[in-house]
Amino acid sequence: MATARGRIDKRQAILDGAFTVFARQGYAQACVQEIANEAGVAKPTVYNHLTDKATLFRHAMRAAAQNVLDQRLAALQPLTEPGPDLRAGLEEVGHRLVRLHADDRSCALRRLLYAELNHFPDILDLVVESGPQRLSQALADRLARLTLAGRLRATDPDQAAEHFLALITGPLETRSQMGTRRLGDAELDEIARAAVRTFLHAFGVEDDRRGSGPEEPGLRS
């Protein structure tokens, strides 16, 4: 059992080290020896776990995407039991998602995807399988429950989830210049609040549009 556990841990260290090196150097400039050094293992150990550089890249991208997804799924937790103030619950989710979308690992993942997509067209499917599609599905499930409870207008929850995520990621990508400009907390919070305000204007019911705080301008029916 200890041997199996150690092998899993070593493989994870290799994948983490590989992603770090690929993000820093790009695929073409990265070398397996540097990845081994980053992971704290011998170069032959890398080849024993993942047979070549291309295979290592694909697995590192998939593992990074899964890690990002796990964090974003956890960020949806406030919508499991949002309480009486739906606006506050949505804003909490929005605040968490903008920070995760803007963190170094997420930005590096997107940059690598864009940079290497022509050479590795299959990595788009690898990343999407462990990324936006599953996040949107999980969010749609929570929005569907809120719709059934009368907290949101009756509509297609998949579409509502897509809109919510687009309201966050669209402005974030534009303002951060595709992840190359770091945004401060105040700007991230502004993006989250604006996303929720617009989302509730489109999908909210009267009470949850306003929440428990002061009414936002322009939201009265």
Image: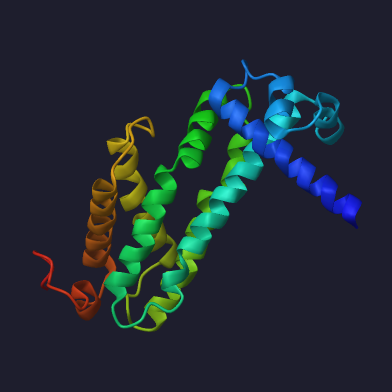
Q: Is residue 95 left or right of residue 204?
A: right
Where is residue 168 shown, x and y percent of the image?
33, 51
**Extreme top residue here?**
29
Where is residue 88 shown, x and y percent of the image?
29, 71
Closest to the observer, 18 or 117: 18
Location of residue 30 with respect to 141 vertically, above or below: above
Closest to the observer, 57 or 119: 57
The colour style of the image is: rainbow
> What number of labels is visible?
0
Location of residue 130 with respect to 61 vertically, above or below: below
Q: Is residue 166 left or right of residue 197?
A: right
Closest to the observer, 166 or 30: 30
Q: Is residue 122 left or right of residue 159?
A: right
Q: Quadrant of residue 152?
A: bottom left
Q: Residue at x 42, y 72 (%)?
A: 79
Q: Quadrant of the C terminus?
A: bottom left
Location of residue 64 with respect to 57 vertically, above or below: below
- Asked if one can make out residue 122 in the rendered structure from this viewpoint, the answer is no
Where is residue 58 shown, x and y percent of the image?
68, 34
Q: Is residue 6 left or right of residue 145?
A: right
Q: Quadrant of residue 97?
A: bottom left
Q: Residue at x 61, y 49 (%)?
A: 66
Where is residue 114 shown, x and y percent of the image?
50, 29
Q: Residue at x 77, y 47 (%)?
A: 9
- Asked if one can make out residue 95 in the rendered structure from this viewpoint, the answer is yes
Q: Quadrant of the N terminus?
A: bottom right
Q: Residue at x 66, y 34 (%)?
A: 17
